Amino acid sequence: MVAIEMRFTAGRFHATPWGRHVNEGAVEWPPSPWRLLRALVAVRYRKRRDVPEEHLRELVEALAFEPPCFHLPPATVGHTRHYLARYRPGKSDMVFDTFVALDAGDPVVFCWPDLTLEPRAAETLQALVGVLGYFGRAESWVEARVAPEWSGEPNCLPRREAAGIEGEQVEIMVPWPAEEYAQWRDPALKRALEIELAEKSEEKGTPLEETSLTKTERRKTEAAFPADLFAALHTLTTDLRRQGWNLPPGARPLPYIRPTDALEPRRRRGRTVTARRPTVARFALAGSVLPRLTDAVHVSETMRQALMSHSDAAEVFAGRDDDGEPLQGHRHAFILPADDDNDGRIDHLTVYCREGFDPQAQRALAGVSRLWQPGRRPDIHLALLGLGEPEVYGGFD
């Protein structure tokens, strides 16, 4: 058995099914196996180039041989609406961002019950799955792992394996087995070349037997038919659309049966949560002229003044209590400029307070978006990367 667990850490999975427009509000659920294989291919080139291509090819062919089953956790559908500015005054486009909402702690499980990977393929899968940062669109943050000990029950299966199981039918994209793709590819390419030759013959008014395709024309047609399944997984979606494919070569829609309530809203039990105050705020700096590291004191003081302005001089930033007395025990915020890329200029700011930031201080931190610079230098733009604990940002070492 092979099983992959995926936890969506932001509680959302963003992915539009193939052939559907984003504004249709359709969601891909379960996540398609075709998408999974493309993600594994992509992450190899981006993060694990030490994995040989031949090993990746072996893994892809093994996972494509049979479609997986799924265990789907409770989920529902949500959406947000965004108005994107266009390059015409007063005009904007509304875009729907539809997503599957689920608990960040409940994994989606891909499962191949009858598959046993060769040791090299198993090692490759472990290496690639462990470095997946997102799955679907880039905002679908994910933590994934191979789970050989998984012993749960699938609740979403291919229709041919779901006899007697009640549920609703949904089609998702699965890869062809490598051998089937190879059997399809050569005849399909031959037909495409024959059609192009006939069209050229008709266009030029020459007999078919006296017409031939140029090397460039032939290469263009051949490029639309990837050599094998592994090559098909590398093809960009923009290229597929330009070539006129209704479905990606190497992929097919397969009917699955999923629970009828797979995406129904559920009432959640209320619970009392005592939130721990974040102690660290991390900022990124941007601008045409970033301050030098030697300006650290000035940048820190400018940031402190901005935070005081946004918080009505809260004591955590002012360093004084309501009576104007200095805070004792280092209970005020520390502002620490950093040069993370070692180019001599400040590119990040960390604000730390060991007692944590209350809601008023958090609003102030979120409200600071720019800092003034002396000498007619342009303002510094700030982006709040996040609020959390020191461990999230590397600790104190």
Image (spheres, grey):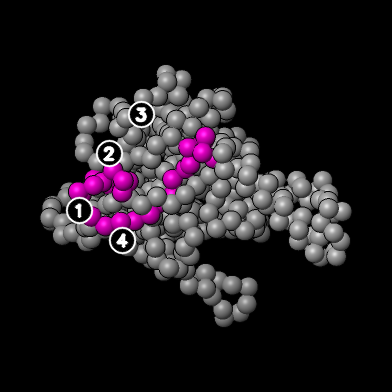
Q: Which mark is residue 166?
A: 1
Kind of residue sitting beneath label 2: Gly
Q: From the image, tell me which residue sits under label 3.
A: 115
Q: Quadrant of the C terminus?
A: top left
**How far separated are the C-alphas under marks 3 and 2?**
60 Å
Secondary element at tag 3: loop
- Marks 1 and 3, how far apart in space? 25 Å
Q: Nearer the viewer, mark 3 or mark 2?
A: 3
Residue at label 4? 77
Any part of residue 132 in sight: yes
Over which residues does the magenta segment extend? 155-181
Which sits earlier in the primary sequence, circle 2 or circle 4? Answer: 4
Q: Position of residue 166 (x, y in %)?
A: 20, 53
Alpha carbons under labels 2 and 1: distance apart:
64 Å
Q: Which residue is mark 2?
A: 329
At 26% from the left and 46% from the top, the residue drawn is 162
